């Protein structure tokens, strides 16, 4: 599929915002959805809507087949060994909290360590803070190098035989840094720790193979990979999940319920209490089909090209500071910046008047903002439907912003 074909699949892109063609540069917050996904969700509600795993009636069977079919698509997409290892959740945040509550609280004790980095999203910080408070474990941060990357020497220095959990993002949502998860997982395992990967910004953009990475848990969100909001995935190694207690109890997840105790269904359903996110999972399955049709390698190469192009073009904007590595080889498809002392919310507002959507704020990464010595930043993030023209428009928009706020230059 060439870029024109890809763009034609996303109806939302074909519109004007404030009198200008929409330039959507906020896919790291949430991606747009192609026809294939919209139609799959539409078809489910129009033709197959029913609860799953219970009815013997035809609609119930269709809904169950579609829901479980989506699980198999996810399994194949991340190369999990079995569907028992693929749990549907609400998203990355819920997936990480599930590990922090069910695994960490049961397995950590005083003197144990949880190791994360300064570049983590709040969803990969706060669950560990809470687990540390409850268990008496210590939360440790791997420092960042000057360009925002982490070095394996620092990883080795911070992971010790006391470390029980290492939890790191595949890709930073602010710096765009791609972390060497396979190497970090090896160091974690050599020390007897498990490796938890926040895949929110990684899984949508590059081929992730859980067996190759040898990660123990992987969390990601459907809405950042062309699927609806409200659906996500927790991958976990079977032997770990088998020994974990569910965090939500009720319908769907039980085997037998007695007056004073109950037993759980087998994996993965013991972690899916209540009526699941059926339409969301079906939408995620359709999104995976779409991404695979385009090809994850093509998507990664396209975004990598756009990031390199953006770094080059943006460096010509006077007064613009770009955060994260200058070397495009170390980056995924997003660029975070500030324009002199103009507040990023003002930058985003002027860009919006030009039809350009970027995110401004702390990006749910306040410890990283502190490290960057910024209160907030602006961020342009790319996906498979973005073009060099989008980057050119961003540069034009920033030059206009600069004119508008000429008193701070
Ligand atoms: N981890 C990372 C690295 C993220 O970028 C995000 C969301 C999350 C976890 C949480 O994902 P959720 O789907 O559970 O909310 N990041 C962003 C962002 O950068 N802008 O808006 C949401």
Image (spheres, rainbow, N blue to C red):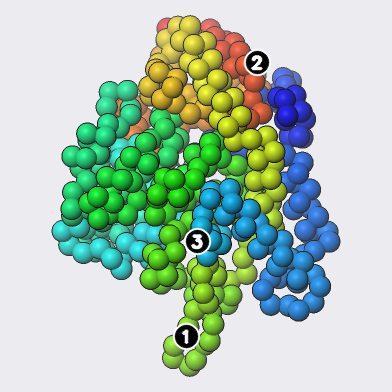
Please indicate whether residue 134 sits to the left or right of residue 127 in the image.
left
Identity of the residue drawn at 37% across and 41% down: 182
| Mark 1 and mark 3: Cα distance apart in space | 22 Å
Callout in the foreground (1, 3): 3
Give residue 158's mark.
none
Q: Tally the marks.
A: 3
Q: Residues within 10 Å of mark 1 (few under 14, many from 20)?
A: few
Q: CA distance from mark 3 to mark 2?
A: 41 Å
Q: Residues within 10 Å of mark 3 (few under 14, many from 20)?
A: many
Residue 383 image point, x, y percent: 60, 31
Report the side of 64 relative to 383 (left or right).
right
Is 246 situated above or below 81? below
| Residue 192 seen in the current view | yes
Does dot 2 land on a helix, a strand or a loop?
A: helix
Residue 345 in view here? no
Q: Secondary structure at mark 1?
A: strand
Question: Going from the N terminus, do you reach mark 1 or mark 3 first?
Answer: 3
Judged by depth in the image, the label closer to the viewer, 3 or 2, is: 3
The residue where tag 2 is placed is 389
Q: Which circle's residue, 3 or 2, is located before the other in the chain?
A: 3
Q: Which residue is mark 1?
A: 262
Mark 2 crowd level (few <14, some 14–19, many ≥20, 10 Å Cα): few
Q: Is residue 38 above or below residue 295?
A: below
Left or right: residue 51 versus residue 148 is right
Is the N terminus in the top left, top right, bottom left or bottom right quadrant? top right
Residue 269 in picture, x, y percent from top left: 55, 70
Q: Which residue is label 3 attached to?
A: 85
């Amino acid at each position: 599929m060439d870029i024109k074909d890809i763009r034609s699949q996303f109806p939302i892109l074909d519109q004007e915002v404030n009198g200008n063609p929409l330039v959507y540069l906020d896919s790291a917050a949430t991606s747009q959805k192609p026809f294939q996904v919209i139609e799959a969700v539409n078809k489910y509600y129009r033709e197959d809507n029913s609860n799953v795993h219970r009815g013997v009636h035809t609609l119930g069977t269709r809904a169950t087949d579609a829901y479980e079919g989506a699980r198999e698509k996810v399994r194949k997409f991340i190369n999990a060994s079995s569907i028992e290892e693929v749990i549907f959740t609400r998203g990355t945040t819920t997936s990480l909290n599930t590990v922090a509550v069910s695994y960490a609280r049961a397995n950590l004790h005083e003197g144990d360590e949880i190791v994360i980095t300064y570049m983590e999203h709040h969803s990969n910080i706060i669950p560990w803070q809470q687990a540390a408070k409850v268990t008496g474990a210590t939360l440790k941060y791997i420092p960042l190098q000057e360009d925002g990357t982490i070095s394996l020497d620092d990883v080795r220095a911070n992971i010790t035989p006391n470390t029980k959990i290492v939890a790191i993002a595949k890709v930073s949502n602010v710096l765009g840094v791609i972390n060497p998860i396979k190497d970090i997982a090896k160091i974690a395992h050599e020390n007897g720790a498990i490796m938890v990967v926040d895949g929110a910004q990684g899984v949508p953009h590059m081929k992730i193979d859980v067996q190759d990475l040898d990660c123990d848990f992987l969390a990601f969100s459907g809405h950042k990979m062309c699927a609806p909001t409200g659906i996500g995935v927790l991958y976990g190694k079977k032997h770990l999940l088998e020994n974990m207690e569910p965090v939500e109890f009720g319908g769907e997840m039980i085997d037998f319920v007695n007056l004073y105790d109950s037993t759980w269904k087998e994996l993965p359903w013991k972690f899916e209490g209540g009526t699941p996110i059926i339409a969301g999972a079906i939408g995620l399955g359709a999104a995976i089909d779409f991404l695979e049709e385009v090809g994850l390698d093509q998507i990664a190469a396209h975004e990598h090209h756009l990031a390199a192009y953006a770094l080059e073009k943006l460096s010509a904007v006077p007064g613009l500071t770009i955060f994260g590595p200058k070397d495009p080889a170390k980056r995924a498809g997003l660029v975070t910046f500030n324009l002199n002392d103009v507040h990023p919310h003002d930058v985003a507002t002027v860009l919006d008047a030009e039809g350009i959507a970027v995110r401004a704020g702390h990006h749910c990464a306040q410890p990283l903002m502190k490290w960057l010595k910024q209160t907030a930043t602006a961020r342009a993030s790319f996906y498979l439907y973005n073009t060099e023209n989008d980057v050119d428009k961003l540069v034009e928009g920033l030059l206009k912003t600069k004119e508008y706020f000429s008193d701070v230059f």
